[in-house]
Amino acid sequence: MQLGPFFGLPGHERAQQLDERNPLLTQRGRFEIGDPELLYLDGNSLGRLPSAAIATIEHTTHHQWGERLIRSWNEGWWELQLRLGDLLAPVVGARPGEVIVSESTTTNLYKLAMAAVRARPGRRLIVTDDLNFPTDNYVLAGVAELLGCEVVTVASADGVHGPTEEIEEVLAGGEVALLSLSHTCFKSGFTYDVGRLTAAAHEHGALTLWDLSHSAGSVPVELEANGVDLAVGCTYKYLNGGPGSPAFLYVREELQDVLENPIAGWWGHADPFAFDLEFTPTTGIRRFHVGTMPTLSLAAIEAGAAQVAEVGIDTIREVSVSLTELMIAEAEQHLTPLGFTLRSPRDAAQRGSHVSLSHPDAWPITRALIEDAKVLPDFRAPDSLRLGIAPLYISHVDVHT
């Protein structure tokens, strides 16, 4: 997809030309679109409802729960979180058996951070940045307090770009147990070079834990190729798994039987139905489960995850870059003269699938868009208007409009 030839055309015609080359344009028809005039630019907070998910939820509710009752545990429920993990594995560049759907992103981050720091005794530092999602930093602070470590929060120079070089300097000190960052930062959309920082961490003896919540389903990650140790992510943004849907976690195969899950629960037991009073951890990725999973919510994830896997993350990324490039070009033409400032990286290689613009009146502008213009964006304090570009249902004409 080439943007260049169309940039001399009027805006709407240019967008139409780009959509003629858009391989994802037909994917919108696979979602429930309540108001066809609504421009939904908040799919990076909550993705749209896949039509196929409705049938899955109804079948799970009426047949599996309503008719088969407890027999459904032996007819698919017990393995569902593993099957979904294998469905997500190629989306994040992992091998089968390395991803599992389990609890919330926050709980998963806690489990894996505790396991990682315990696996590096004698090292006293956990490293993150000030662009990370705040909950992640809360979790890391709690882990540090429990284990007698210290969190080093490396500051971004401009509040947009991640402080890669400064993080590498901290890693070089040799005292870091764990590096934990968001792959794509929730405000600016800055996207780290996972391979570069993972290699730097490993060179100096640290483990890595990446939060993929704002990249899974929109940006290629390549966990295996980059040697990533651990990762977590939510399923309700670009994966369209539904509000509050269970999260996923990734543990590199070589670490699965080495690391210890700090929350011992019966779903992570080697023989859960023996009901032993002493805990014996199972092997493999199940080791990082804790308690009984919410089956109805699990079932809702499958349609969106399957669609992303079917279309392919590389195609999604290609369209995402085209859409965000157009968004930035339109913003510079129409909004910069009105006092807006781009707060996302200009370099597409460093940008995820949302564009942030700042303005002193960003909050009332957001409200006006929602109430008067049928545009549903997102606001992030203090002054960011965040425009989520979900390529499966956002077109170039949408961006222009």
Image (spheres, rainbow, N blue to C red):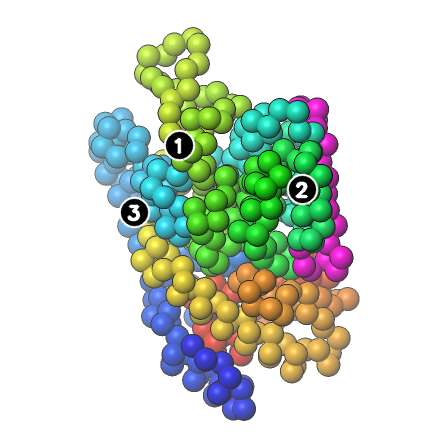
Q: Nearer the viewer, residue 210 or 189?
A: 210
State which tag comes first along the sequence, 1 or 2.
2
Q: Nearer the viewer, mark 1 or mark 2?
A: 2
- Under circle 2, the secondary element is helix
Q: Are marks 2 and 3 in contact (CB under 8 Å)?
A: no
Q: Position of residue 30 (x, y in %)?
A: 33, 62
How many labels sit on residues?
3
Name the residue at 77% across, 66% down. 360
Where does label 1 land, which residue?
A: 285
Tell me which amino acid carries mark 1.
Ile
Label 1 neighbourhood size at 10 Å, few (<14), some (14-19), many (20+)? many
Residue 150 counted in the magenta span: yes
Where does label 2 land, which residue?
A: 171
Where does label 3 land, which residue?
A: 56
Name the residue at 30% across, 33% down. 79
Name the residue at 69% across, 29% down. 124
What is the magenta range? 145-162
State which tag comes first along the sequence, 1 or 3.
3
**C-alpha gap between disc 2 and disc 3:** 46 Å
Q: Which residue extends farthest front?
A: 203
Q: Position of residue 217 (x, y in %)?
A: 44, 55
Tell me which amino acid carries mark 3.
Thr
Q: Nearer the viewer, residue 146 or 78?
A: 146
| Vertical position of residue 164 compared to residue 346: above or below | above
Tell me which amino acid carries mark 2.
Leu
